[in-house]
């Protein structure tokens, strides 16, 4: 893909009046939350064990009668293979011969500059893939790059079903706060005794637009105090605000997740809820690279190697990353859809 940049005649020696490097928008909202604990591991597989502590109500018995037997919770062990992600590229001499240095009118590009540019593009691909896996850990299903092949479904891996709610966003009489409280209760039950800071929700664009247009949400935020007023009693107009970066309703922070690569990382008609502030709830492990020198070592987030071709015909580049993003308690991941949209949405 990047080869065409250096073979295009427009990038030969010629005068330019201006230069602009255009970098595409890259989603980073999942990693930006800072909720993933990162760790390198020396193996290419990861064992995850769930050890449930069972409790129940104790029935009343007569004194001297046999006691009710305690039933220990079941321990569940799953072994997951860490995904192996690698990119390769080759730089040939003819791709840099006579090519102008980007942003310069009279200086030729160096081999080092070309290598750095290729590595930057490859690194961006790794970043986007890690973000995509992170979104998968927050939704419970981790997909491959094609967006349809499932690498891991955390719910089926542990034999559980995801909690899901239908928000009738097109029904003005639907009680949005009541539905949000149902989500909060479901997550609290799934967490058990574990504490959390707040509940966050990544929303697809259509679901988000319909949610903020619902009368319950609009009415609540007509009472949202404008922080810039210094508490002077002035109120912001929710309908005129761009709230995609996140706002709180019924104890949940709603955020419109924007973008993807070939398609949106969060489907347009879905919303996904998850708790924030729970230690080690979301994790990313990095397995060692597939090189002789890295075997049985602690994995790094990314590897890059270069090797000259025979007879000096060029340079081969290889980048590699071996990440696995996952949630240690998938029952805390709640999904919302809608079977009813307001007029005009989507």
Image (spheres, grey):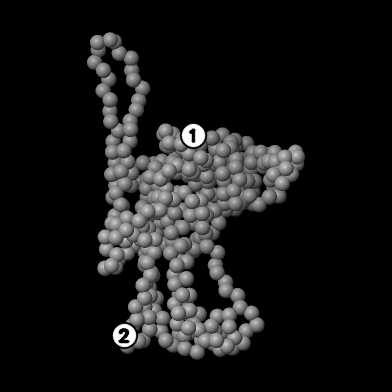
Give the camera-side residue of 110 and 191.
Answer: 110
Residue at 52% from the left image edge and 86% from the top image edge: 108
Q: How many marks?
A: 2
Compared to residue 174, the image places residue 150 above or below, namely below
Q: Residue 130, percent across and down?
A: 43, 59
Compared to residue 76, the image places residue 10 above or below, namely below
Q: Residue 111, percent across and down?
A: 45, 82
The secondary structure type at the circle numbered 2 is: helix
Compared to residue 99, the image places residue 206 above or below, namely above
Q: Residue 67, percent across and down?
A: 26, 17
Give the camera-side residue of 78 and 163.
Answer: 78
Residue 201 numbered mark, or none: none
Q: Is residue 89 left or right of residue 237?
A: left
Q: Earlier in the sequence, mark 1 or mark 2?
A: 1
Give the label, 1 or 2, closer to the camera.
2
Whole-angstrom CA distance, mark 1 to mark 2, is 64 Å
Q: Is residue 140 visible?
A: no
Q: Give residue 300's quadrant in the image.
A: bottom left
Judging by the rendered image, the residue that carries numbered circle 2 is 310
Judging by the rendered image, the residue that carries numbered circle 1 is 185
Q: Give residue 147's quadrant in the image.
A: bottom left
Residue at 51% from the left image edge and 36% from the top image edge: 184
């Amino acid at each position: 893909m990047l080869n065409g940049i250096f073979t295009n005649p427009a990038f030969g020696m010629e005068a330019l009046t201006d230069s602009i490097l255009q970098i595409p928008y890259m989603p980073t909202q999942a990693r930006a939350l800072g909720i993933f604990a990162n760790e390198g591991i020396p193996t290419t597989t990861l064992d995850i064990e769930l050890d449930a502590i069972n409790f129940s109500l104790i029935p009343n018995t007569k004194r001297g009668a046999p006691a009710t037997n305690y039933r220990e919770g079941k321990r569940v062990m799953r072994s997951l293979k860490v995904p192996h992600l690698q990119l390769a590229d080759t730089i040939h001499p003819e791709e840099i011969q006579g090519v102008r240095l980007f942003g310069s009118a009279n200086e030729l590009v160096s081999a080092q500059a070309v290598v750095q540019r290729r590595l930057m593009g490859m690194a961006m691909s790794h970043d986007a893939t890690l973000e995509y896996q992170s979104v998968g850990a927050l939704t419970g299903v981790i997909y491959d790059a094609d967006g349809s092949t499932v690498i891991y479904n955390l719910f089926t891996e542990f034999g559980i079903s995801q909690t899901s709610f239908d928000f009738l966003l097109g029904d003005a009489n639907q009680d949005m706060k009541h539905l949000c409280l149902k989500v909060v209760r479901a997550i609290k039950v799934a967490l058990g005794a574990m504490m959390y800071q707040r509940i966050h929700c990544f929303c697809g664009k259509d679901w988000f637009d319909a949610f903020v247009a619902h009368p319950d949400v609009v009415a609540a935020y007509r009472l949202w105090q404008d922080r810039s007023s210094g508490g002077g009693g002035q109120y912001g107009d929710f309908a005129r605000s761009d709230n995609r970066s996140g706002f709180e309703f019924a104890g949940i922070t709603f955020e419109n997740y924007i973008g993807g690569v070939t398609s949106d990382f969060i489907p347009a008609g879905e919303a996904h809820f998850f708790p924030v502030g729970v230690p080690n709830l979301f994790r990313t492990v990095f397995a060692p690279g597939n090189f002789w020198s890295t075997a049985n070592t602690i994995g790094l987030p990314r590897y890059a190697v270069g090797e000259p071709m025979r007879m000096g015909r060029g340079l081969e580049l290889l980048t590699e990353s071996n990440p696995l993003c996952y949630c240690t308690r998938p029952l805390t991941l709640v999904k919302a859809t809608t079977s009813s949209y307001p007029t005009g949405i989507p």
